[in-house]
Image (tube, rainbow, N blue to C red):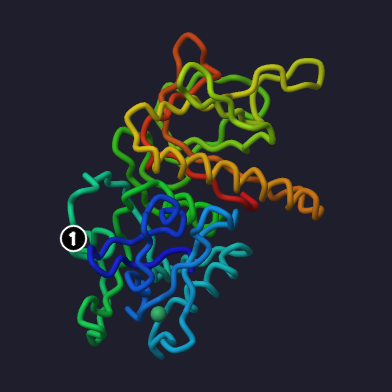
């Protein structure tokens, strides 16, 4: 499972967040679908794969848990549209809501008023069987996963404060692959990660992307992310750098395996530099993530 619920705060935790949670409480995470305890794995730095959550053999999912159904839905959604006249069959984040991380949130995600909900019996006492069709994400990652997993359903509603658009396909925007473009509106931008290592330049981490201005069949001026981590903890900076490194490795592996269409995509919300428009400054770790696969 890519994500689970923090037993104590009720917040959805993405596997990648385990890179900066120290120490990881092995008993602290429960299934998003049914509330059984799940096992956080691969979070230690030496693993170099993405942390995730696994079912414990001693604690199987409840019979009514819809987590596996969700995984099957994603397999189908990669090939075809899954929205029907009755609506979208799963749950998805429909807005980004950055909250103060010290705040405790009582329920997984932030359920939104007036939306369809389904509920069943309560299970472990720390959670109830309640799924919300639309919920608020606290980082861009669940939004980016939904974008990747449901390529034929990108008309789903999405609101990101300050950004252009009201749906996934309007808010999320791929950077121009062969030119430097000045973007008048804010978006969640996407571009493939380049294979070169990030560089530390005057206290900032500079990450090259593999889109940008081409001359003589060469990428002569790539888009760059300038990550300003000056106000972040060491753990958060290491989390972002670890994800970039793991993603770069994933991209090389997929390419080596002949899967040329699978790239590592960087999703970010950043401020485009007005004098040097190839550069975007990102200064919040919640507004950058990398996912590997076919877009
Ligand atoms: Zn479950």
Q: Position of residue 84 (x, y in %)?
A: 46, 68
Task: State how many labels appear.
Answer: 1
Q: Is residue 85 above or below residue 59?
A: above
For ligand 1, the image quadrant comes to bottom left
The residue sitting at 44% across, 76% down in the picture is 67
Camera-side residue of 291 and 228: 228
Q: Position of residue 28 (x, y in %)?
A: 32, 70
Camera-side residue of 286 and 273: 286
Q: Going by the image, does 129 lie left or right of 191?
A: left
Q: Position of residue 22 (x, y in %)?
A: 37, 55
The residue sitting at 69% across, 36% down in the picture is 195
Camera-side residue of 70 and 152: 70
State whether label 1 is within 8 Å of ligand 1: no
Q: Going by the image, does 194 lie left or right of 134?
A: right
Q: Going by the image, does 254 lie left or right of 245?
A: right
Q: Position of residue 193 (x, y in %)?
A: 62, 37
Camera-side residue of 100 and 74: 100
The residue sitting at 24% across, 79% down in the picture is 128
Q: Is residue 203 above or below residue 244?
A: above
Q: Is residue 204 above or below residue 13?
A: above
Q: Badge 1 local density, few (<14 within 10 Å), some, or many (20+)? A: few
Q: Secondary structure at mark 1?
A: loop
Residue under numbered circle 1: 113
Q: Is residue 48 above or below residue 81?
A: above
């Amino acid at each position: 499972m890519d994500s689970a619920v923090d037993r104590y705060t009720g917040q959805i935790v993405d596997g990648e967040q385990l890179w900066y949670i120290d120490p990881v409480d092995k008993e602290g995470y429960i299934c998003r679908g049914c509330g059984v305890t799940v096992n956080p794995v691969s979070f230690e730095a030496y693993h170099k794969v993405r942390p995730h959550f696994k079912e414990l053999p001693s604690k199987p999912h409840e019979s009514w848990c819809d987590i596996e159904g969700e995984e099957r839905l994603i397999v189908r959604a990669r090939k075809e549209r899954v929205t029907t006249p009755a609506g979208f069959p799963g749950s998805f984040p429909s807005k980004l809501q950055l909250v103060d991380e010290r705040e405790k949130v009582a329920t997984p995600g932030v359920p939104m008023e007036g939306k369809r909900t389904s509920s069943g019996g309560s299970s472990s006492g720390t959670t109830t069987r309640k799924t919300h069709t639309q919920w608020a994400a606290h980082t861009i990652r669940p939004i980016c996963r939904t974008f990747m997993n449901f390529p034929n359903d990108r008309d789903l509603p999405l609101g990101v404060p300050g950004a252009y658009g009201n749906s996934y396909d309007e808010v999320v925007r791929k950077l121009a692959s062969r030119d430097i473009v000045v973007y008048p509106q804010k978006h969640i931008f996407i571009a493939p990660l380049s294979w070169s290592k990030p560089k530390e330049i005057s206290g900032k981490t500079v990450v090259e992307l593999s889109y940008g201005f081409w001359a003589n069949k060469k990428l002569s001026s790539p888009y760059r992310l300038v990550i300003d981590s000056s106000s972040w903890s060491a753990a958060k900076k290491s989390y972002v750098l670890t994800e970039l490194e793991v993603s770069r490795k994933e991209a090389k592996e997929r390419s080596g395996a002949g899967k040329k269409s699978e790239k590592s995509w960087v999703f970010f919300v950043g401020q485009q530099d007005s004098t040097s428009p190839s550069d975007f400054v990102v200064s919040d770790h919640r507004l950058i993530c990398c996912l590997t696969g076919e877009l």
